[in-house]
Image (cartoon, grey):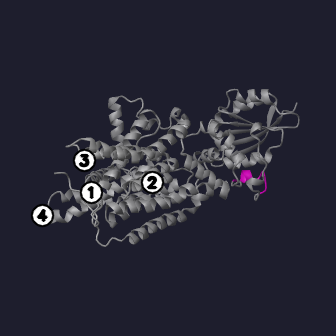
């Protein structure tokens, strides 16, 4: 006999009986979860007003690129982005203005949807207490709130991931309804790039399920059923696949970067690969919440990460709860959807890391898995908690001695996750690398006169400089930039620097400044504006020597802390 499916009160497979559960109550609780997300972001409102820093600046540049040059410019994007997320960013810039706060809306608003969707998913699969714990762990995690306050798509990715799983779990009465839901899942992949990692394994699951159900009596009926299931799920794969093939692969220049080398399977031998896999899975389990970034030094992390003992204890407890959750969910039709999506995505990411397309492990691009991993662990913790009373009555089963600390530690995950809010609060007004680029470009726009030549030096300077000179409508925030113009001058009122007057140099001090001045020296009465990114300042002395050799000397200097230096060069006297 096969395993018996748990059923709802209506007799449908996939959902446990929950006496007294009302849809209106579930919706109200979901709205409450969204309200919690609003409240936590309101507390950290200052984070949304901070100037854009390096890891944010490049995204609005590509989003706001004119259509004539958008496609060619996109090929050098720092990391791949989904078409929908770029469109959202552009929409916010065009509607609300190209301001730091408005460009962060596509990250902030999805946190509300993420909180509500996490509740709906968790509540479908477990009780109120465990579901509430999952929502708190995700919504109040300092790292998640930090990501929601930046121009990055990770909260949007997480919300879309939960939505795809919920859509796939739904059981419409007609084939047309099922097809519509699969198409909706595919469209979510256009909004969120990593949704593809969920859709592919779910498609395989749909196609293989009828074959598995009829494994003892295979035949044409099983094949026909599998074919129909695959046909219904195919639109999701087609839409997501075409988006990835036609739009995402065009943005694969990041494969040459070394930033994610520690999280790529590529280039590892068998033993090193096995060690890498175990290390990353351990890091994923030990996160608070599980799967959250534990690598990026520019993000806040829970205070528990500073204690190796706590990290190990949380990792072991979450692993045990996750295994229990996997066993529990494996007995349910909708539970298997969550398991297949989560495990399948991890396998696809691992394969992508072997070709340097996507990093594997507890890193920010994999934030979309955080709510899914958290819900599985919450289901497991609930299952283990329900078994404790029976074990206590049964002559004090010694297993209880293990279960109690496991449950206590798993229940502490939301608290551990929320400890990341403390460093976020303490650093809410702190400076970040290259966060005065808009100030530097505002000063350059005030100083620029038609006929001047602008030299921008630094491998990472181009995207931020173009955003600041062509799109940004923010005013200067530093005293150095304000001294070049009136304090209240709006960015939109400053003259834009023509791209034709700008030369970008990937390196400083290697002869590029001298060569640019030889080829494009300004005419009489004009000047040279030389900006050097902070990361490339060590080549400044050589670059100024090149300028002097070409007859240009520094006349004015504007320094932007942690960002760079802008100099005005005029013809050398004598």
Q: How far apart are the two marked residues, 1 and 4, measured between alpha carbons?
A: 20 Å
Residue that numbered label 2 is attached to: 180
Provide the secondary structure element on which disc 2 rests: helix
Between the residue at mark 4 and the residue at mark 2, the CA separation in whole angstroms equals 50 Å
Q: Is residue 476 magenta?
A: no
Q: Nearer the viewer, residue 558 or 19?
A: 19
| Residue 234 or residue 92, whichever sits in front | 234
Mark 4 / mark 2, whichever is N-terminal? 2
- Quick check: marks 1 and 4 in contact, CB under 8 Å? no
The first of marks 3 and 4 along the sequence is 3
- Where residue 531 appears, as percent x and y from the top left, is 71, 39
Mark nearer the viewer, 1 or 4 = 4
Tell me if mark 3 has few (under 14), some (14-19) or many (20+) residues whose alpha carbon lies within 10 angstroms of its own. few
Report the span colored magenta: 478-486
- Which residue in the rendered view is the most extreme toward the bottom? 20
Look at mark 1 in the image and give the residue it sits on.
406
Percent position of residue 155, x then y? 49, 54
On screen, 442 above or below 49? above
Question: Which residue position is annotated with label 3?
Answer: 213
Label located before the other in sequence (3 or 2)? 2
The Cα–Cα distance between marks 3 and 1, rounded to whole angstroms, is: 35 Å
| First along the sequence among labels 1 and 2 | 2
Q: Which residue is mark 4?
A: 394
Q: CA distance from mark 3 to mark 2?
A: 25 Å
What residue lies at 52% left-to-right and 32% top-to-bottom? Answer: 256
Verify CB contact (< 8 Å) between mark 3 and mark 4: no
User: Residue 516, relative to residue 324: is it above or below?
Assistant: above
């Amino acid at each position: 006999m096969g395993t018996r499916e748990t059923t709802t009160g209506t007799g449908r497979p996939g959902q446990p009986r929950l006496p007294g559960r009302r849809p209106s109550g579930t919706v109200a609780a979901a709205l409450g979860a969204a309200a919690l997300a609003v409240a936590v972001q309101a507390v950290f409102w200052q984070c949304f007003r901070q100037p854009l820093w390096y890891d944010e600046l490049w995204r609005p540049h590509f989003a706001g690129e004119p259509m004539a040059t958008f496609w060619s410019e996109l090929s050098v994007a720092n990391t791949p982005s989904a078409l929908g997320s770029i469109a959202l960013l552009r929409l916010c810039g065009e509607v609300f203005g190209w301001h730091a706060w408005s460009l962060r809306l596509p990250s902030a608003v999805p946190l509300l949807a993420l909180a509500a969707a996490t509740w709906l998913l968790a509540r479908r699969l477990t009780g109120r207490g465990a579901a509430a714990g999952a929502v708190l762990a995700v919504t109040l995690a300092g790292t998640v709130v930090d990501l929601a306050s930046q121009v990055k798509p990770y909260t949007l990715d997480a919300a879309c991931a939960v939505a795809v799983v919920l859509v796939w779990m739904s059981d419409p009465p007609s084939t047309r309804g099922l097809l519509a839901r699969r198409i909706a899942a595919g469209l979510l992949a256009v909004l969120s790039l990593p949704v593809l990692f969920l859709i592919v394994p779910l498609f395989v699951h749909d196609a293989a399920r009828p074959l598995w159900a009829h494994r003892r009596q295979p035949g044409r009926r099983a094949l026909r059923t599998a074919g129909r299931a695959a046909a219904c799920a195919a639109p999701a794969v087609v839409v997501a696949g075409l988006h990835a093939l036609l739009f995402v692969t065009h943005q694969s220049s990041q494969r040459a970067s070394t930033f994610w080398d520690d999280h790529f399977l590529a280039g590892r031998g068998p033993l090193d690969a096995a060690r890498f896999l175990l290390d990353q899975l351990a890091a994923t389990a030990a996160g608070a919440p599980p799967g959250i970034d534990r690598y990026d030094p520019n993000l806040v992390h829970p205070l528990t990460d500073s204690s190796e003992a706590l990290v190990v204890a949380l990792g072991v407890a979450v692993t045990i709860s996750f295994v229990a959750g996997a066993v529990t969910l494996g007995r349910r039709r909708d539970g298997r959807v969550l398991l297949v999506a989560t495990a399948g995505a991890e396998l696809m990411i691992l394969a992508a890391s072997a070709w340097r397309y996507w990093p594997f492990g507890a890193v920010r691009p994999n934030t979309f898995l955080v709510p899914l991993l958290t819900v599985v662990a919450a289901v497991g913790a609930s299952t283990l908690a329900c078994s404790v009373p029976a074990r206590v009555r049964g002559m004090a089963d010694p297993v209880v001695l293990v279960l109690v600390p496991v449950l206590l530690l798993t229940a502490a995950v939301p608290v551990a996750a929320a400890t990341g809010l403390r460093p976020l609060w303490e650093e809410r007004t702190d400076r970040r690398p290259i966060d005065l680029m808009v100030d530097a470009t505002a000063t350059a726009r005030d100083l620029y006169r038609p006929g001047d030549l602008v030299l921008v030096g630094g491998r990472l300077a181009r995207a931020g400089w173009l955003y600041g000179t062509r799109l940004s409508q923010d005013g200067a925030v530093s005293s150095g930039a304000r001294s070049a113009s009136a304090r209240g001058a709006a960015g939109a009122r400053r003259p834009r620097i023509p791209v034709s007057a700008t030369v970008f140099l990937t390196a400083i001090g290697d002869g590029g400044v001298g060569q640019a001045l030889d080829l494009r020296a300004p005419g009489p009465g004009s000047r040279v504006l030389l900006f050097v990114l902070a990361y490339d300042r060590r080549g400044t002395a050589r670059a100024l020597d090149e300028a002097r050799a070409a007859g240009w000397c520094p006349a004015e200097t504007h320094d932007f802390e942690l960002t760079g230096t802008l100099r005005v060069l005029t013809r050398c006297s004598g």
